[in-house]
Image: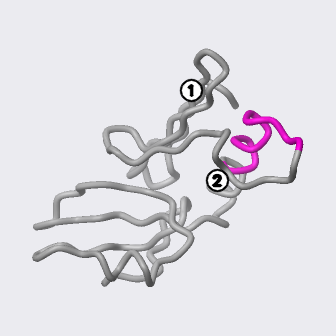
Amino acid sequence: MIDSDYVSPDGELRFIVRLKDGDVTMGFDGYPWHTHGDILAAPAGSSAEARAEQFVDALLSNRSIIAVLKEQNAIKDIWITDDPAQDKQHLGEGELVEFRVWGGSISGVF
């Protein structure tokens, strides 16, 4: 799982996981949003690598909601969201956000 690249079944997304100096960094290739294994919520005592593995498993199993921010049909950022309603409230002029899962199904456009 560490130092892995995952491409969504529809070929639209690439998720990258890297381990460097004990830090696990994860994010969508080419976009600013990312997270680290050590800041993910998890049971006490679990390692950053174990938390990252759980995070990636949820993503690849379509249990995570992916937000895709677009402006004039161009993708500006992609992130995993816990609160789509909150994400919709922060859209700028001309922006929209699509919600999907890894498998490609769109769950909403706002």
Range of magenta residues: 45-55
Q: Residue at x 64, y 53 (%)?
A: 60
Looking at the rendered image, the disc whose residue lies closer to the viewer, 1 or 2, is: 1
**Helix, strand or loop at disc 1?**
strand
> Which part of the image, by quadrant, shows the N terminus?
top right
Give the residue number, with chain letter if any, for mark 2.
Answer: 60
Foreground of the two, 15 or 20: 20
**Crowd around label 1: few <14 · some 14–19 · many ≥20 (10 Å):** some
Left or right, 45 with respect to 20, comes to right
Q: Nearer the viewer, residue 54 or 101?
A: 54
Q: Quadrant of the C terminus?
A: bottom left
Q: Position of residue 79 (x, y in %)?
A: 44, 57
Q: Position of residue 99 (x, y in %)?
A: 43, 73
User: Does 95 lie within the magenta span?
Assistant: no
Residue 35 vs 92, above or below: the answer is above
* Crowdedness near tag 2: few (<14), some (14–19) or many (≥20) residues, C-alpha within 10 Å: some
Q: Residue furthest top?
A: 21
Question: Are dots 1 and 2 in contact, CB under 8 Å?
Answer: no
For image coordinates 40% across by 48% down, the residue present is: 33
Q: Main secondary structure of the magenta part?
A: helix
> Which residue was labeled with disc 1?
18
Q: Which residue corresponds to the image point at 38% horizontal and 38% vertical from the top-left?
A: 29
In the picture, the disc for residue 110 is none
Hey, what amino acid is under mark 2? Answer: Leu
Q: Amino acid at mark 1?
A: Arg
Residue 64 in picture, x, y percent from top left: 61, 64
Please tell me whether residue 50 is drawn above or below residue 72 in the rendered image: above
| Secondary structure category for the residue under label 2 | helix
* Distance from Cα at disc 1 to Cα at disc 2: 16 Å
